Each structure stands twice: as structure tokens, then as C-alpha cells.
Image: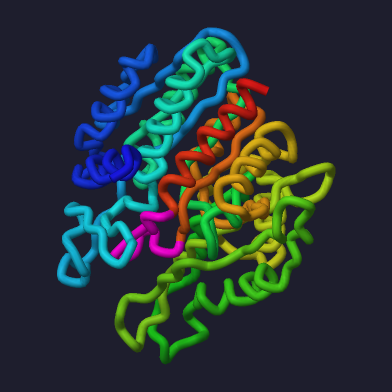
Amino acid sequence: MSKTLELAIDLLKRRSLTPEDADCQEAMIARLEPLGFKIERMRFGEVDNFYARRGTSGPLIVFAGHTDVVPTGPLDQWHTPPFEPTIKDGMLYARGAADMKTSLAAFITSIEEFIAENPDHPGSIGLLITSDEEGIAVEGTVKVVEALQARGETFDYCIVGEPTSNKFVGDMIKNGRRGSLSGALTVRGIQGHIAYPHLVKNPIHLVAPAIKDMVETTWDNGNEYFPPTSWQISNMNGGTGATNVVPGEVEILFNFRYCPEVDGQGSSEASLRSRVHAILDKHALDYVLEWDHNQSYITPRGKLVEAISQAIEKSYGISPELSTTGGTSDGRFIADICKEVIEFGPLNATIHKLNECVAVADIEPLKETYKRTMELLLLK
């Protein structure tokens, strides 16, 4: 059994349901301290985080990730217990196998091998690990980044170990993420008996033309790195439950996954808000709208993208595609102190699903990819 697989199994045994860490971070720290890393444990609220660094000179390459995992779902629908890692037919099954404890294990063993071969390497290596990524993500990476930013510390390169691969490991890396702008819209009408329509104002009827306008709006056409902005309703609720009462208000939750402005194209958070309000105002609606925003980020082609692309080609024999699709990640916070942030990790086909798994054969090449990326960025 390889050292990477052995460490992955150790981490996967730990029941680190978000925001619990279950001592995963201490297991990682125990491997890093003998290598000369300076460890900073950063606990915010109920969330464990740590930042580790070896070296004081640049460039600084940081590996970032999370030890927390999502809930298991129905235990009786798992082939094997989710916190008892099991290898079957070449696959390693456990909650967190793909998202993202295998990547964490590969971080550690790639660093161990790199340092063993290059004990006096130039530059610095760091890790930023949280247990608050799968949850509300308010006491994790964002707080660590704020603390580092306050003392003026920046990264040159950052690799987030998210499961980015699509059909084959190595076929896709994320060089950015779309912004996420959510709205909680309440449209008010006048409640009353359904048999007396002249005495009521049905808020569902009133808002329907505005919904049609937003569905039919072309918000932008995307750009080189991002697909066009998408607007979708996720929830809509109105009514008392009775069949003879017109509701007094309707609540609508919607979300933009938006293409940010790049070289003058795309949309901005402010422009999307403004255009939504303009549509609602055009229809003279009585409404309240509350917003919630997760920022976007983008890393154009540069040293990091080229280095990890070369490393992937060497390890997996695949030329990776750049992509910004999918949900949000902690890369959006790290981009505040790092100009070059990418995400790369295992297949994402089973993440958050029952019977989450990774192929054992893909684990060592993942470790080699991270190691080769360090070689290309620190030694060349």
C-alpha cells in the first residue's frame, strides 16, 4: 500500500462531518512538523483551521483544502459504511474520498517526497487547511485569509485540491469560478377570498410578467473563460394551504451564476442587481429584495496553469481543459491574496453522493502531479 493511500484511509476513517475536523488536521500536522513547517493553528468560532509554511523566501506555493465532509445520507443505501474506507474492484469507497481527503493525502506525501529529494529547495511551501468549506464557510478559509492579509502575507501560487476532473482524472482544471448572486424576493399583494377577485391582488399573478422578463433576458454572452450568466429560480412559496384563499405575498428565491467582467465583457454584481430592480420596478411591484453574494475569481494562463498542465500530462497522459463551471469554492477567498489560483483533484462524478469513491489507480498519479508542479515552479 502506498503512503498516499495509507494516509487517505487514515483521514477517511475520521468522522469529520462539517464543521467537525475529527483530528484530521492534527494527523496532517504530525507529518508536516518533522519537515520543518511552522504551524499556525487558527480556530475561529467552532471551526479548526491551520496555516503551515516551510521557508521564508519566494516564490510561495500553497496547497489549500478542507477536512470536513458532507452528511452521508441514508446509511442503508451505502454499499459499505461511509467511515470505514473499503477497497472494492479497484475503487476506494468512503465519504470524502473524492471531496477531498485523497487530495489532502496527496498534498502531504508529495511534499514529503519533494523535500526528501530537495531539502534545501528555493522558495517556500505552504498549506491552508479548513474544516468549514462544506458548510456555511464563514469561519474557515475566509477568516484565515483575512488574518494573513492583515499582516501583509501573500501567496504566489495556490492549488486547491477540489475534485475537478470530469470523465478522466486530469481532463479538467478549474482556473476560476463564476460569481454567485442570490436573491430572496418577497412580492406583496392583498389576501382575500378567491371568489371575490375584485377585492384581492394576487402577488403570484403580479410577479409572473417580471419572471417572464428575467427568464427571457440575455444577461451577457459569456467570454473567453466563463459561460453566459444564468438566472434560475430555486424556490417559490405562496399561499395559506387553503384552496379558496388568494395569498397576501409570494416568496421567491433565485440565483445568478454569473460571468464576471473580463476585458470589458460579462456582467458585474452591481449591474445584475440594478437590472433586476429595473425589471421589478417596471412592473410596479410592491416588493422587498435581499441579496447574498459569493465573489468570482479567474486565473488567466500563466506560470501556474502551465506548470500544472505539464505535470498532469506527465502523470496522466492527458492535456487538461480549463474550466470555470460548477459551484463555488474557497478559491474565491484565496484569490484576494494570490494572483494565481487553480483547482485540481480527482473525478467529481460521486461527490456528495451515496457510495462516494475514487479509483486507487488514480491516487499515486495525483501525488506525482502535485510534486511535479512544485518542481516546475520552485526548481526551474
Whether residue 288 is visible to the viewer of this picture, yes or no, is no
Find residue 131 and report its horizontal and vertical position in percent.
Answer: 32, 36
Find residue 11 and report its horizontal and vertical position in percent.
Answer: 26, 41
The quarter of the picture where the N terminus appears is top left
Q: Quadrant of residue 341?
A: top right
Kindly give the residue lying farthest to the bottom in the view shown: 195
Kindly give the residue lying farthest to the right in the view shown: 264
Q: Residue at x 43, y 31 (%)?
A: 141
* Number of marks in picture: 0
Q: Residue at x 30, y 24 (%)?
A: 31
* Residue nearer the viewer, 260 or 269: 260
The stretch drawn in magenta includes residue 71: no
Q: Residue at x 62, y 43 (%)?
A: 296
The colour style of the image is rainbow
* Residue nearer the viewer, 242 or 98: 98
Which contiguous range is marked in magenta? 349-361
